[in-house]
Image (cartoon, coloured by chain):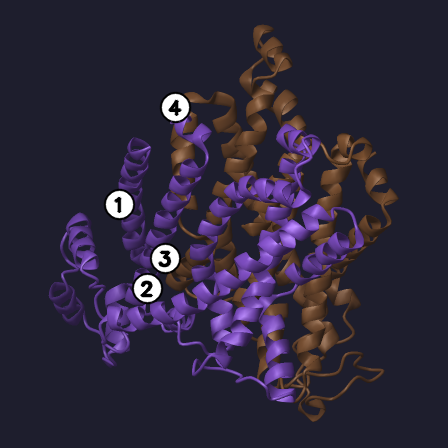
Amino acid sequence: MSLYILKRIGMTVPLLIVISFLTFVLNHLSPMEPVKVILHAQGVPTITEELIAETKAKLGMDSPLLIQYMDWLIASLHFDFGHSYVTGIPVWSMLGPALLHTLKLVLVSSICIFGLSIVLGVICAIREGRWLDLSVRSLSFLLTAMPAYWLAALLAWYFAVKLDWLPTSGMSDGASYVLPVAVLVIGYAGLYFRIIRSSMLSHLNEDYVLYERACGIPESIVTLHVLRNAMQVAITVFSLAIPTLLGSTVVVENIFAWPGLGTMTINAILSRDFPIIQAYVLVLAVAFVLFNTLADVIHAAMNPRMRREH
Amino acid sequence: MLLKRIWNDRLAALSLTIVGAMLLIGICAPLIAPHPPNEVNMELRYAGASWQYWLGNDHLGRCVLSRLIYGIRPSVLWVLAALIASVFVGTAVGIAAGYWRGRVDAVLMRLCDIMLSFPGYVMTLAVVGMLGPGLTNILIAFVCLKWAWFARVIRTVILPIAEADYVKFAKVLGASQLWIIVRHVLPIALPEVAVIASSAFGSMILQISGLSFLGLGIQAPHAEWGMMMNEARTVMFTRPELMLAPGIVIMVVVSSVNFLSDSLQKALDPKLMVIRSTNGMKHRYQRKEAALQQ
């Protein structure tokens, strides 16, 4: 088991290196030269060739690409992602708090999403084909076809303006979590509950269930056994859901003016603030890879058949 | 035969009609739209519905109905084009990896692994961030990112086909590799590819309109559904109906596309018509769920 974990972690190292290199090269994808963007952002009126060369030398942009990459990587490992082109503030001092705010939102919503989808998935699997299953599934079908930002706007209009129960935007107290979390839960629970449901259903057809039923074991205990096996698929999906959610809160944050990663990144994109975009991509991609590894390890720990294959 | 099967299911037929009508209206937009979509008419700012302007006018007095009709082009037609492009690349890579196996497979799949290790939404934002906002850049980002996922899924579809006896026979008979792929592998895989592609279509429409809503997509004054909602957002609390129209259209289109993809899957799988719950179906169903997540 520990060998498998070590192997799996060993596999992530080259992947992380490739990812960081791609993220670094992203900067060079832009049609605008980064130096010019910096000078523009600093409000330099006329950009001369000498000025460009001078700034390049100052920022170390005239050295070969690989050297630049190594410098950048070492700095990034120390959470030093450079300075914002626009404001000049160190990127990490903006990214850190924003990441924390987004994490809070994501954690609260993922707990709600997982709870709701497990409950709905189990109920619908047990009542397969009955009206409850059908109505929950049609509702989720309709809700997943709804644009998240639209739903967010409607909820904000109804609960925050018309009824004046909840704040429209910002992150002040517990009440301001309700609307963003609700939008994320509605958007994602529909997907995850269906995965749990279909995984439950495929396990309900297995021989061991027939055997347990034949032995007269109460249905509630059989359900628990099925759930334990169905959770294998669910845990893999869930552990990938957290980084996916981290990346997809953008729209919701934007609508509710949540001071998180999404809001920061959209502003950075609109003002072409490359270091922030770069740091954002790097942090999320690393999180994605780490959670992916974690998912595999948990999966292996729960399913001995997986381990032997490797 | 396939169409007939879909047609027999009433809801699926309705979805097919809606999607077909949307595509047709989008293509013939100049003939159908009652007014030019960018015609500004300041006297009619925020006018309600009238016989001349069926859905009223927006903040510049432009006809909401005409803008909705023209919005089909970027919101649905261009998304479809990007989808087809990425499915095309994905199919080519998937077939190459699944048919030749060995080193080709290893290299292509590692490449896909790297592409897939970036969360999709984040990568789209990154590419748009670097290239600058605009519909073309979003579509480029989508094609660059989605192909890897399609390639992965299509490879697993191809694997058993490439190992099938009749393909081996064709090889023994000395058929050229291209002929085998075009004649014996592709036609079998095509229905599966259609299901995979159609299941991604709905979420792609939602994502692209979401990016437009954030102001990263098509730029003013062009009409696009997400963009229309972004414009309506400032008056969301006083005139929510401007927000309602594009939202309902998106919902109708996306749920029809999703429903159509479901019934396409059912229509292509004759087993499902006889026995409702076999394990094979479950596997397909799970793949479908995974597709929806992407």
Residue drawn at x 80%, y 49% is B12
**Front disc: 1 or 4:** 1
- What amino acid is at disc 3? Leu
Residue B258 is left or right of residue B107, and the answer is right
Are the residues under marks 4 and 3 on the same chain? no
- In the image, residue B38 sits, relative to residue A16, either above or below, namely below
The chain carrying label 2 is A
Tell me the CA gap for discs 1 and 4.
22 Å
Which residue was labeled with disc 4? Answer: B103
Which residue was labeled with disc 3? Answer: A284
Q: Earlier in the sequence, mark 3 or mark 2?
A: 2
- Tell me whether the residue at label 4 lies in contact with that at label 3, contact meaning CB atoms closer than 8 angstroms: no
Tell me the CA gap for discs 1 and 2.
26 Å
Q: Secondary structure at mark 3?
A: helix
Residue drawn at x 38%, y 35% is B110
**Front disc: 1 or 2:** 1
Q: Secondary structure at mark 1?
A: helix
Q: Position of residue B216 (x, y in %)?
A: 48, 68
- What amino acid is at disc 1? Ile
Q: Which of A229 and B62 lies nearest the eye of the viewer?
A: A229
Task: Say few, some or many: other residues with alpha carbon within 10 Å of mark 3 (under 14 / 14 to 19 / 20 or more).
Answer: many
Residue drawn at x 64%, y 55% is A120
Q: Which mark is residue A17?
A: 1
Which residue was labeled with disc 2? Answer: A32
